[in-house]
Image (spheres, rainbow, N blue to C red):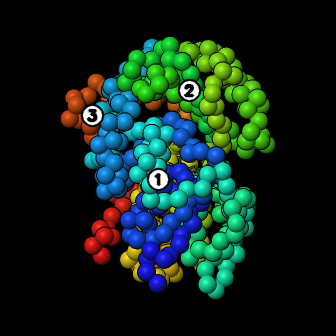
Amino acid sequence: MSAGDRRVLISGAGIAGLVTAYWLKRHGFNPTVVERAPELRAGGHAVDLWGSAVDVIERMGLLSAVETARTLNDTGITIVPGREPLKMSLADLAVRIADRHAEVMRGTLVKLLYERTRDEVECLFGDSIRAIEMRTDGVRASFERAPTQTFDLIVGADGQHSTVRRLVFGEESHFSRYLGAYIAGCSLPNDWVPSGHLARYVAPAKTVTLAPIRQSGELAVGFLFRRPTELRIEHDDIERQQQLLRDVFAGEGWHVPSLLAQLPKAHDFYFTPVSQIRMQRYSSNRVVLVGDAGYCPAPAVGGGTTLAVIAAYILSGEMARAGGDYAAALQSYEREIASAVEASRHVGPSLIRALVPRRSIEISLGMHIASFVRGLPPCVRRCVPLIPRRALRGLREVASLRLRDYERT
Ligand SMILES: Cc1cc2nc3c(=O)[nH]c(=O)nc-3n(C[C@H](O)[C@H](O)[C@H](O)COP(=O)(O)OP(=O)(O)OC[C@H]3O[C@@H](n4cnc5c(N)ncnc54)[C@H](O)[C@@H]3O)c2cc1C
């Protein structure tokens, strides 16, 4: 059987799914993507591509488009703990995770990836896999809408709350680990922050970050707060979620009251526990998980986009390298990404500790240290890591995952 006869079903037209689709097609496979949403989900705020993820984007011919679309929020950050604001250059925060980096809006990246694949890969929107059955000649997928079909392989690229994972590996609760915090966000009119600049308000156990969105002129508002136990709150109960935010941030200063008052007007409000997906294996028989579905390091604070892009490239490449031997390909894929997945698990917990100090004394101390570092000569300043070492190590390990040239092997 030639690679072109090998049919692969990819669940999810997100970042991992579209990168997988592109490379599988390029290696001669016959991929189909199924996306639950009726159209491309181009929502979300900024995501980071570090190191090898930028190399993958370049190999896909998308580097200049991604460069053009960069958020350019890198002129500086103002941190407000309630008294004197501290202004810092973002160059001070460039912690040498990798020598290549691009921050782009998630929606822009998803659209670019889709544009790159849409002419060659069929994408079924508004559908979802309902059941998966292993057979001797392949794996059968039945859908909510489309007729049942048999594939050689199914790739679950359907995000943190993956359906493929649930159908094949078990309930999400077996794999999801709550990291003790919640994140919420939305886009609002930008009345405060100059273009290219970030602003952050820090109070004990809670923080708000404001980042201008160059493309829309709006402000990306991100709330992050600690909560020791996970709440029983439905993912679509926006009214309760916004009320909870108002309760948690009640009495805070700066622009917080105004931001809270505007929440009901937001067109893209989201609210989620910060959890990571921890699994021993990401493949079983003819089913494999890629991206957040298999190893979400933590939404927004874990380097998940970089990991997803690189892992999708490696999965597709290992499939090409192994010819028709799926078992060998999936084993190599798991082996190649194992240490980066492990390292990525330290990023979220470590960043939450640093970004959301529990007590006022920790905030004051952090501000004093930041002030002191700001006063150092640039050559000394550059040596001081301003994010925790564990997070730095984790991000570096993910960003430096080695990329083979699978088109030559
Ligand atoms: C709408 C949205 C907004 C986001 N915003 C941010 C952000 O602002 N900052 C940030 O750091 N990260 C954000 N993320 C997460 C970020 O994209 C991922 O952590 C990372 O890029 C890894 O991508 P992924 O492809 O594994 O998962 P995702 O990007 O989550 O993509 C998963 C895709 O699978 C689809 N899907 C889900 N269930 C099914 C199903 N049953 N059948 C078919 N398709 C399904 C989803 O609709 C989605 O298109 C967002 C994700 C989404 C979906």
Disc 2: CA contacts within 10 A as few (<14), some (14-19) or many (>=20): many
Percent from the top left, x then y, of residue 63? Answer: 31, 46
Contact (CB < 8 A) between labels 2 and 1?
A: no
Mark positioned earlier in the residue sequence (2 or 3) = 2
Please state if 337 lies on the left or on the right of 230 as rendered: left
Percent from the top left, x then y, of residue 296? Answer: 56, 54
Secondary structure under badge 3? helix
Q: Amino acid at mark 3?
A: Arg
Percent from the top left, x then y, of residue 298? Answer: 56, 48
Inter-mark Cα distance, 2 to 1: 28 Å
What is the residue that sits farthest to the bottom in this orientation? 136
Please state if 300 lies on the left or on the right of 398 as rendered: right
Q: Amino acid at mark 2?
A: Ser
Q: Quadrant of the C terminus?
A: bottom left
Q: Amino acid at mark 1?
A: Arg
Disc 1: CA contacts within 10 A as few (<14), some (14-19) or many (>=20): some
Badge nearest the viewer, 2 or 3: 2
Q: Which mark is residue 187?
A: 2
Q: Which mark is residue 381?
A: 3
Residue at the spot of label 1: 118
Disc 3: CA contacts within 10 A as few (<14), some (14-19) or many (>=20): some
Mark positioned earlier in the residue sequence (3 or 1) = 1
Please state if 246 lies on the left or on the right of 342 as rendered: right
Inter-mark Cα distance, 2 to 3: 34 Å
